[in-house]
Amino acid sequence: MLNPAAWQQPPRMPYNLPMESTSPRRPSRTLIILVAVAVLAAVLFSIVPGNLFTWLWEQLNLFATVFLGIFVEAVPYLLLGTLASGLVEIFLDREQMARLIPRGSLGSALAGAVLGLVFPVCECGVIPLTRRLFSKGLPLPAGVAFLMAAPVFNPIVIFSTASAFGWGRMLLWRLGLTLVIAVVVGLIFSVEKDAGKVLKMATPILNPNPIQKTSLPFTEKMRRALVIAADEFFEMGRYLIVGAMLAAAMQTFIPQSALLSIGSGPLLSVLVMLALAFVLSICSTVDAFVALGFVGSFSFGSILSFLVFGPMVDIKSIMMYRQVFKPRAVIYLVLLPLLMSLLSGLVFNYLLP
Amino acid sequence: MKRPLTLDTLAIGLALVLAAAIGLVILLGGQMGVRAAADLPEGRLVGPYQVITLTFSEPVDPELTAALWTLQPQVDGLIDWPNPRTLRFTPSRPFSLDTDYELTLRPGAVTPGGREIERAQTWTVRVREPLAVVLRSVNGDSGLWAVDLDGNTSHRLTSESVKVISYDAARSGDYLVYCSANEQGGIDLWRVSRAGGDDALLLDCGRDRCTAPAISPDGARVAYSREAAGPGPDLPYGSPRIWMLDIANGQNGPVYADQQVIGYGPSWSPDGARLASFDGLSDQLRILDLTNSEQFIFSSETGDTVTWSPDGAFFLFTDMLQDENGLRTQVRRADLTLNKTDVLIGLNDRRDYSYGSLAWSPLGDRVVLGLRVADDKPGESLWLFDPVVLEGPMIANADGVTYNAPVWNPWGTALLFQQFKLRGEYVPEVSLWSVGDVEPRLLTEGLMPRWLP
């Protein structure tokens, strides 16, 4: 995995993350957009019939409620993830990382899949943390497996799933399938020897970090960790907002009842639950309680696929994946868990007792 | 030259393999049809009121499915659908002992789209041997013990660290609820399973006293008497009131919103629709119909627990009458359909027989009644009679012994009751009487017997 070119890059300050920079927005453009929105709203207000306006107003209220629901639920976990990221940046050095993670593809993917037990983050927090770990030299298969598995394979989610479904079949299959899917996707990515081809980073991932080499006082290290966390929180938070808005829009205009009414047969039930997992964008720490509401109406296999797929892929996480991975990799990160979750749900629905 | 594997090749290849596997599963699964699983205990040994649940692999049509479902020998009961995938059968009469019941699901279409159950499925269940539960005092600590009906083997159900005050056993025989004092001076409700040793706090009552638990026939709720602690440690407890705890969701609250309504000794009708309790302040039996909140009030001077007819339309209770001959007890029958009572026993008595300890058989054809047969016999005897003709034999009438607290088994074929010798060592005992027996058989030491079917 060592890329000699990486060492030729100039060292960067830790809080300047090695990623593509975004150009600052000019106030004039913002002003133009605001004026355009105001004009559009005025035009709509004047031309649409009263009942349509009432409907739109209700939809807007619903959208705002759903958006705030998703955002408020996810934001603490994003904060935790970015805090962990900041701490990793300051306190974990490359040598330690190299010692911790096995070098072989399978060992590396397995280690990444269970790393969530050490870093209990959900799907919002895992993305900035994974990006940071990549910058610390985390091998690609380990990082991908961590990204896939950590939102489920962590103590908080294990306990929340057990609270909802008990220490039994659902919990075991959720953990088992998540582990298998994470390791398989990690192994698939292990064939890519040049991480730069899949990771969306301006600088290579093995960028040496000067901060650990210095002997700064603990308080200063913590201050820097917090600065990094704050920077990253605001940076990833933008994508969380966009993702949450998209998810809220989907839920507003494609109501849950419409999805549920599509069908509950062995195939359709899995497809519906996968679609729900994608659209609802619920944090993995609470999704088991939502899934519990579907017990009885939906089969074990379809609920299991909801619980396995949702933490790996949903609207807001795709928005955030796009900041870490190149589009081709994002497609695989969505497609492979989707197909594996669908297959496992169908196996349970059709073949297993 | 061999091309090295790339991420694209591998990812797309895997996606294609997964897509093919999905197609194969759909193809194979389509041929397997709809499947069903029965939720039954290990060994298929069930309680007499075992609720049988069939869960289907996908939502099914209730009418189509009910036509394919049979239970042999037939048992009266209710079929309902908690959700489109689950059929639930709740027996209204107990499954018989020593009988194998076959639950069969025949092949046929069960969904509106024509999906079928491809193969017949059969499950066999058999009712387990019932046990008796008694309260025993060992070294000053009272605990619950399960005893087999031979009286040969017994095992302690409750932990040695708890002291049981009163209890009730679920009609299903799966668990018991008991009361035990806590460190704050109050009394809590606890739950323990049929196997025992897994005591779990059901309701922390703090300084309040929660006593006389009565488990609803469906096992979902517990009615109990609750005395609120006084505002200070030395201040007296309030009057008892009837509260209800939902076991599944922990919802807990007084049955009567009116704080003036007091009561103790809750008793469920066999269908679980009505709840009786005694208001000692106004000497009234109060019956609440939980389905429509209708209340029935009958006066009673004794405060004894009522006994219900199998259909829940009648109940028997004791009352006292004061006339020129003095104070006499009577057995009254309440008809909830007509909202009136009449004297069943004791209308023309010339002396007081101290009627008490009523137990109406689940079959409805027999009632057990405790009474003092003669003035010179201080003990209470047990009389078994037909409630229509008011005739029957004495089943427990030994000299120097008093009998009470009779309870029928779910089949109405056997009776447990407690007995005390009036002279000599005070050792409470529990006896068993079965239909056809001339005399009861001493079962074990203990008191407050219950069936654990």
Image: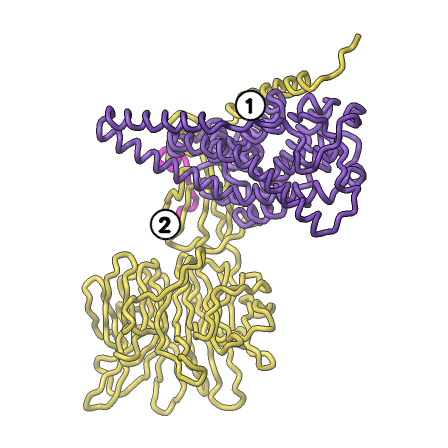
Chain colours: A purple, B yellow
Residue drawn at x 43%, y 80% as measured from the top left: B403
CA–CA distance between discs 1 and 2?
A: 39 Å
Question: What secondary structure is marked by label 2?
Answer: loop
- Amino acid, disc 2: Asp
Disc nearer the start of the sequence (1/2): 1
Q: Is residue B72 magenta?
A: yes
> Is residue A44 left or right of B106 when viewed as pictured?
left
Q: Is residue B192 above or below residue A102?
A: below
Q: Is residue A239 above or below residue B262?
A: above
Which residue: 47% across, 80% down? B419
Residue B233's place in the image compared with B127, above or below, is below
Which residue position holds label 1? B28
Residue B118: tell me if it is visible. Answer: no
Query: Given contact means CB atoms under 8 Å apart, are the residues at marks 1 and 2 in contact?
Result: no
**Can you tell which of label 1 and label 2 is closer to the viewer?**
1
Answer with left or right where residue B155 lies relative to residue B228. right
Q: In this view, which residue lies farthest toward the top?
A: B1
Say what amino acid the circle numbered 1 marks. Leu
Q: Residue A27: horizontal and vertical position, in percent?
A: 46, 29
Please provide percent x and percent y for residue A203.
70, 26
